[in-house]
Image (cartoon, coloured by chain):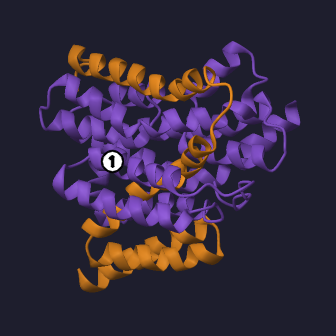
Amino acid sequence: MNSDFTEGLRGSTPILVSTIPFAALFGAIAVSNGQTVAEATLMSAIVFAGASQLVGIELFGHSVPLWVIVLSIFAVNFRHILYSAAITPFIAHFSPLQKAVSFFLLTDPQFAQTLTRGETGRRVSFAWYMGFATTIYVGWVSVSAIGAGFGRLIGNPAAWGFDVLLPIYFMGLVLGFRKRSNFLAVVFVSAVVSVLAQQLVGSPWHVSIGALAGVILAALLPPKAAAAPAAEGEDKP
Amino acid sequence: MSEFFTPYMTLLILVGAVATYLTRIGGYLLISRLKNVPPRVDAALNAVPAAVLTTLVAPAFFSGGLDVKVAMAVSLVIGLGASSIPMLIGGWIVVMLMRQLIG
């Protein structure tokens, strides 16, 4: 039990390399868009979904109506619906309360690592899941608060090269799935459609539209007999 | 900054948190009502992570400047043979060098 928890803690430590700059960036941008330090910290603590938090405060800065902001947060987080569906078989042995807590902590790296662990036949214990989530949660919330506190000192994130870290981090996650069937076709279609949707419809809809295009393609392609999902790269968060 | 919490922003955060939690538990609520997952649904679910994450990468590449494009291309090459940390460090070095040298 305890060793599973510490294994989880250690397992997600490399993710802090990308979480910490992103959290600091969120805190700094949140304050510059009119949030207080307390609000930025609360948002990181209870929303706990970086991209949608940035979208939310960005739209707030443009004086967009509340329901549009909430719909946008929902759209950016839409992928979690598919994540929670995909990890359900591996956490079926959790109690209802454990499931409720686990889904609150379901992030991109948490999903990728839970799926990798489950599909390679290792048991996804609640202790491991919580250990893996704890590093990310504590890092995310505390550095958001620090970033908000120092927000005005950081100034322009591009001057520090922080802006490029997030897409590169997501690219690493994409590469982690490259052994899956139809990988190249799905990535190609999602890439083209999301870029087109960004131009024609605008952000953040391009995320859901592009993703849906790739997912529909995968459903339409002829199913491969007994195409067991290959194990993803172990080193990818 | 004199206040800790303003009413409108606090409401936005709370509603945003509820919307986010609904997405996180939604797939479980849907899937636990389905007994057998049809092969095409399975293939679709299998494609979700790469499809979603690609939409966070491709537009950033497309709309980024030359510095971002070169940094992401270098990171992609690194990522084919290494984990995400060398990718992040390599991409960061490239973007900082280009910004220092070119402006």
> Which percent across, then down, holds residue A37?
34, 30
**Which of these two is toward me, A62 or A184?**
A184
> Which percent across, then down, holds residue A148?
35, 39
Q: Can see residue A33?
A: no
Farthest residue, direction left: A63
State whether residue A172 is above or below residue A135.
below
In this picture, residue A51 sits left or right of residue A8: left
Residue A44 falls in image quadrant: top left
**Which of these two is toward me, A193 or B71?**
A193
Residue under numbered circle 1: A209
**Which of these two is toward me, B60 or B30?**
B30
- Of the 4 image quadrants, the one containing the C terminus of chain A is bottom right
Which residue is at a point 58% across and 72% down the rendered structure image? B79
State whether residue B72 is above or below residue A82.
below
Q: Which chain corresponds to the colour purple?
A: A
Which residue is at a point 70% across and 19% down the rendered structure image? A98
Which residue is at a point 33% across and 33% down the rendered structure image? A73
Q: Chain of mark 1?
A: A
Amino acid carrying mark 1 in the image: Ile
Helix, strand or loop at mark 1: helix
State whether residue A42 is above or below residue A16.
above
Chain B tint as drawn: orange
Which residue is at a point 69% across and 14% down the rendered structure image? A96
